[in-house]
Image (cartoon, grey):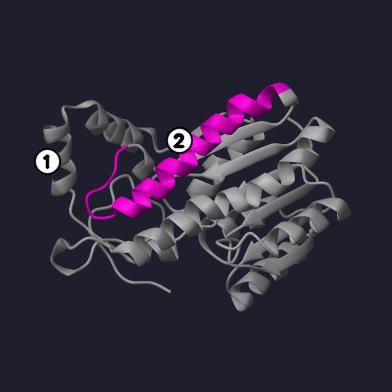
Amino acid sequence: MTSISSVLITGASSGLGAGLAKTYAAPGVHLVLAGRNAGRLEATACLCRARGATVATGLFDLREPEPLGAWLLAQDEAAPLDLVIAAAGVSAGTGEGDMPEGVDLAAMQVRANLLGTIHTVEPLLPRMIARGRGQVAVVASTAALRGLAYSPAYSASKAGIRAYGEGLRALLRPKGVDVSVIVPGFFDTPMTDRWKGPTPFMMSLDKMVAAIRKGLDARRSRIVVPRLLALGQQAADLMPAALGDRIVRGFRFHIEPGH
């Protein structure tokens, strides 16, 4: 297992990003944490410092590439990053009466999730390639495996992240940089609290973080948790379209509006 001394995590104000930050916090580890909520981000940073890590924080809207890119390069200059985890994400869904999300809401999810991931990763790649080492992790979703009827834009944004990570891995491995594509199912976070509907194979945040950390430590190309949910999504994708559509229409849910 390669030694990790400097880690960047986006979405560190809550949920998966905050959970991963805490699991990496230890003496000798430098954490670079980005988020949108100042109070929650500082709370995460304080917990990480209490565990012995040094921490730098930054508040950014990842939909905007600047000044995020300049800050990322400055952080890498101060402490070259061994691991970059793009964990930030948002979710939304269809409106009342199963009406489509509309341009603004759909585009917001693609910008925040897919472009936010690209804005995080791309500025750092030339430096990681020049060093001939490093690891990048992008967080997709089981929704990336077959579009969900009641959150099509979220599904599209996560499918884009998955394809982006898969392509990067093929490109970067010969250059010494590993890429892990994380495909999680349901787990206990504030984002899931807004989900009103079935949550098959639901996991606690701690169990999900532990599974992802294990996969990252092993530098796995794909980290899929839980596998049974992913297999169900893939099976629906391989079916004739009409049958797959009927199945995802029957998987009814509503996502309450968030901030």
Residue that appears at 70% across and 67% down: 58
* Residue 38: quadrant of the picture: bottom right
- Image: 123 above or below 177: below
Mark 1 vs mark 2, CA separation in Å: 25 Å
Quick check: 126 left or right of 18? right
Across and down, in percent, residue 186 comes to 37, 50
Helix, strand or loop at mark 1: helix
Residue found at the far front of this picture: 103
* Residue 71: quadrant of the picture: bottom right
Query: Do the CB atoms of the residues marked 1 and 2 lie less than 8 Å apart?
Result: no
* Within-10-Å neighbours for mark 1: few <14, some 14–19, many 20+: few
Quick check: 6 left or right of 233? right
* Type of amino acid at the residue the image marks with label 1: Arg
The tag on residue 224 is 2
Quick check: 175 left or right of 40? right
Question: Along the polypeptide, which appears first: circle 1 or circle 2?
Answer: 2
Across and down, in percent, residue 36 comes to 58, 70
- Image: 236 above or below 191: above
Across and down, in percent, residue 46 comes to 71, 70
* Within-10-Å neighbours for mark 2: few <14, some 14–19, many 20+: many
Across and down, in percent, residue 196 comes to 25, 63
Q: Magenta segment, which residues?
A: 146-174
* Type of amino acid at the residue the image marks with label 2: Val
**Residue 86 in view of the camera:** no
Name the residue tied to disc 1. Answer: 246
Task: Please state, as top left, top right, bottom left or bottom right, where the C terminus lies in the image.
Answer: bottom left
Residue that appears at 16% across and 40% down: 245
* Viewer-closest of 44 and 99: 99
